[in-house]
Image: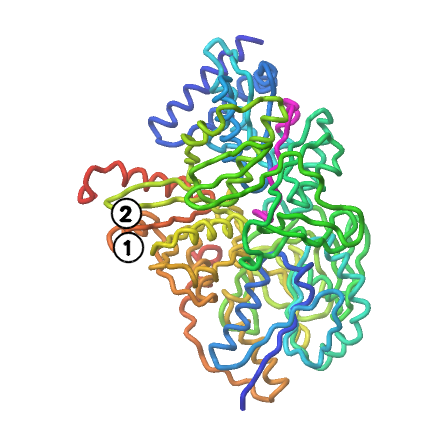
């Protein structure tokens, strides 16, 4: 019923505005919830109005950045794209992306949709629409209290893949877990990967999640590996191995930014973090699989800011501040590498919360290689957030002293006043939004003394 | 006399969920800070284990699938492990490792035979027990705090529990008790990991191991103010207002 849909769109838009302007909060999930209440069919109908294709992005790490790069790449070629930019990736957030993009007549005018979906929420979203493409970035240990175990996540994703047999899966071939899942589900799949040894293998002694073959249980052997379990693997017990890579990155260069070659094209971006090669490559592979040429890719990347607390930069009273999200061991270890890429002296603040969305179990902190901070050029470390006590103990047992300040704003201000001018703030999920608000507010102040 | 402790970490390549590395780090650092040498040996499935050289055995948790793989191996080492336990060998078994101490773990997919070192058994029930947990234990004066996440419900028959549940669920969510203590063996669902926030439990394990090897369990006190603060935060958040 059209009138219902129009009412839902108006109500959702109103709710989002009120939430944003009056309560200064992202009203996205609220808007989605209201829209579905008023018109339960709205997601199905709006998704059906997408002219070309719907992409979804799943996987433990890199969802938001990959999805936003894909969206920007498609837009750079003149397409209209629906996207859940802020990373609200459960049913209400996904609904809101479509509803808030609709016109006041209740209709969408869009060529593509780029939607990241929380793995556990795929089961709730798929009944509303079947995507044309799924990007599967990687599978790491994450928020175990919510999902039980990584095996449970894999079973869940397999089930939704099989519920959409026409959906093509663009998968990280360097990840034995993701690649096995794609093969196992039976959907047509297209691989991307990094084709050469880039980092020193000895640098990290992370526990590799997928050390054992999901097919037969035997140990996987690696020709080379990048981080966590990502690399070029072969099973010692059966015929399982890294599949042929359709979109392979080579000639990797990393310095101030990063660049690589894929399909004979040089791709360049100005941000750090080895994992960003995967994010760009995944988006590239997805667009190419959908037969989109990307002549404007490098231009887009030169202007693209990850934002949303992914290596986001702030300047407050002469201190350069970089905010970065890290919510599980694989992500955190990558963040530590990115911090250590900066040879300058630096202060660090680590903010750990244990709210529902973070995962209430913080034992993963002990699987992060914080010991590497012993070698970094670190001026000071401050621990903050709800579980700062756990974080302080984690560092103590790595023999790294830290200061405790549960209040994030006080921690940040303390380092601006007494730090060395180069500050990294590493936060987990729910700490991201509050910390980002604090940093924005501080940056917008004209003079520091106004505080 | 110079004292040394050897910790055997069983199959960390398979049983490594939930930050077991924290338990190892805690045991070794608390020895080293007191001038006691501490060595950790990580055993893989193919390795021979000589229990005579071990002072503390750590058996961690894995996913059900990985536990199945370990299970086959355990039969081969059962007798040696049993002798070690009966000879007052110190064991800390967490989550899946705790379940493996017993007679069996009955899951939907089948029955995993355990080591049968302690008279207990585990059966899977609908719904996982997940959340923060606080105990009081006879072994120590501080509350014991941690996090539990298990689908199995464990019955410890006539054995002594590790602690009484003040907050959370414990062995089966009904009995009001958590874990098991048998001789110098602690079996528990608490990870988080268990030892860093419960320094007295760490020291209990170290002291028992020293007593057994040297007949001298004396431990110099350490500055535990940070451990106590972390412990007390959890205790007050969940138990006392």
Q: Quadrant of residue B6?
A: bottom right
Q: Could you tell me residue A346's position as x and y percent? A: 34, 54
- Residue B155 point in image, percent of width and height: 72, 61
Residue for point 52% across, 77% down: B31
Side of B9 relative to B48 (left or right) = left
Q: Nearer the viewer, residue A233 or B26?
A: A233
Query: Tag on residue A176?
Result: none
Is A141 magenta? The answer is yes
* Most foreground residue, B207 or B175: B207
Q: Which chain is mark 2 on?
A: A
Give the x, y percent position of residue A287: 58, 26
Camera sees residue B185? yes
User: Dots 2 and 1: beta carbons under 8 Å?
Assistant: yes
Q: Are marks 2 and 1 on the same chain?
A: yes
- The residue that mark 1 highlights is A419
Q: Is residue B217 above or below residue A193?
A: below
Q: Is residue A431 magenta?
A: no
Name the image quarter holding the N terminus of chain B.
bottom right
Identify the residue at horizontal 45%, vertical 49% (top origin): A338
Predominant SS of the magenta segment: loop
Nearer-the-camera pick, A214 or A449: A214
**Residue A99 position (above or below residue B185):** above
Residue B228 in sight from this viewpoint: no
Q: Residue A319 — which label? A: 2
Q: CA distance from mark 2 to mark 1?
A: 8 Å
The C terminus of chain B lies in quadrant? bottom left
- Farthest bottom residue? B1
| Segment tinted magenta in the rendering | A125-145
């Amino acid at each position: 019923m059209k009138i219902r849909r129009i009412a839902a769109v108006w109500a959702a838009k109103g709710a989002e505005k009120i939430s944003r302007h009056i309560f200064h909060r992202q009203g996205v999930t609220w808007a989605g919830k209201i829209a579905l209440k008023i018109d339960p069919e709205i997601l199905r109908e709006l998704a059906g109005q997408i002219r070309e294709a719907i992409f979804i992005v799943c996987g433990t790490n890199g969802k938001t950045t990959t999805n936003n790069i894909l969206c920007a790449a498609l837009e750079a070629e003149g397409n209209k794209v629906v996207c859940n930019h802020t990373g609200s990736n459960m049913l209400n957030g996904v609904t809101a992306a479509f509803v808030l993009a609709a016109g006041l007549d209740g209709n969408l005018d869009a060529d593509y949709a780029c939607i990241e979906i929380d793995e556990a929420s795929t089961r709730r979203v798929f009944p509303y629409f079947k995507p044309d493409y799924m990007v599967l970035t990687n599978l790491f240990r994450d928020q175990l209290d919510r999902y039980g175990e990584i095996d449970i996540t894999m079973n869940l994703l397999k089930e939704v893949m099989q519920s959409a047999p026409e959906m093509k899966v663009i998968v990280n071939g360097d990840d034995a877990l993701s690649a096995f899942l794609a093969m196992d589900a039976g959907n047509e799949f297209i691989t991307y990967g990094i084709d050469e040894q880039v980092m020193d293998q000895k640098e990290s002694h992370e526990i590799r999640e997928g050390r054992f073959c999901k097919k037969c249980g035997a140990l996987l052997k690696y020709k080379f590996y990048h981080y966590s379990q990502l690399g070029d693997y072969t099973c010692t017990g059966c015929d399982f191995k890294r599949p042929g890579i359709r979109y392979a990155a080579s000639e990797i260069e990393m310095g101030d930014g990063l660049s690589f070659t894929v399909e004979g094209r040089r791709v360049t971006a100005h941000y750090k973090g080895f994992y960003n090669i995967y994010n760009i490559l995944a988006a590239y592979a997805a667009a190419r699989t959908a037969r989109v040429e990307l002549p404007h890719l490098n231009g887009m990347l030169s202007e693209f800011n990850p934002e949303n607390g992914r290596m986001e930069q702030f300047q407050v009273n002469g201190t350069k501040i970089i905010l970065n999200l890290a919510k599980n061991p694989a992500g955190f270890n990558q963040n530590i590498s990115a911090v250590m890429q900066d040879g300058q002296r630096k202060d660090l603040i680590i903010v750990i919360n244990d709210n529902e969305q973070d995962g209430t179990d913080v034992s993963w902190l002990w699987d992060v290689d914080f010991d590497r901070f012993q070698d970094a050029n670190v001026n000071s470390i401050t621990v903050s957030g709800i579980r700062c006590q756990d974080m302080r103990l984690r560092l103590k047992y790595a023999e790294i002293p830290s200061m405790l300040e549960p209040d994030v704003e006080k921690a940040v201000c303390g380092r601006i006043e007494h730090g060395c001018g180069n500050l990294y703030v590493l936060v987990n999920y729910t700490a991201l939004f509050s910390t980002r608000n604090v940093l924005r507010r501080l940056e917008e102040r004209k003079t520091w003394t106004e505080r | 006399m110079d004292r040394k402790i050897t910790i055997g970490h069983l199959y960390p390549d398979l049983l490594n969920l939930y930050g077991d590395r924290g338990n190892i780090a805690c045991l070794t650092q608390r020895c080293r800070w007191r001038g006691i040498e501490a060595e950790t040996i990580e055993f893989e499935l193919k390795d021979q284990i000589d229990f005579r050289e071990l002072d503390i055995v750590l058996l961690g948790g894995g996913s059900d699938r990985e536990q199945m793989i370990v299970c086959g191996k355990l039969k081969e080492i059962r007798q040696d492990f049993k002798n070690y336990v009966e000879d007052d060998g110190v064991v800390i078994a967490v989550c899946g490792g705790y379940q493996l101490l017993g007679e069996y773990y009955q899951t939907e997919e089948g029955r995993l035979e355990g080591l049968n070192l302690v008279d207990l058994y585990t059966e899977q029930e609908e719904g996982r027990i997940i959340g923060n947990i606080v105990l009081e234990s006879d072994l120590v004066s501080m509350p014991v705090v941690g996090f539990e996440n298990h689908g199995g419900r464990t019955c410890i028959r006539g054995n002594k529990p590790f602690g009484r549940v003040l907050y959370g669920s414990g062995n089966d969510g009904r009995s009001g008790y958590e874990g098991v203590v048998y001789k110098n063996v602690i079996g528990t669902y608490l990870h988080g990991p268990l030892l860093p926030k419960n320094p007295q439990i760490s020291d209990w394990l170290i002291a028992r191991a020293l007593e057994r090897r040297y007949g001298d369990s004396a431990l110099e006190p350490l500055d535990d103010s940070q451990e106590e603060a972390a412990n007390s935060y959890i205790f007050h958040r969940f138990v006392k207002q």
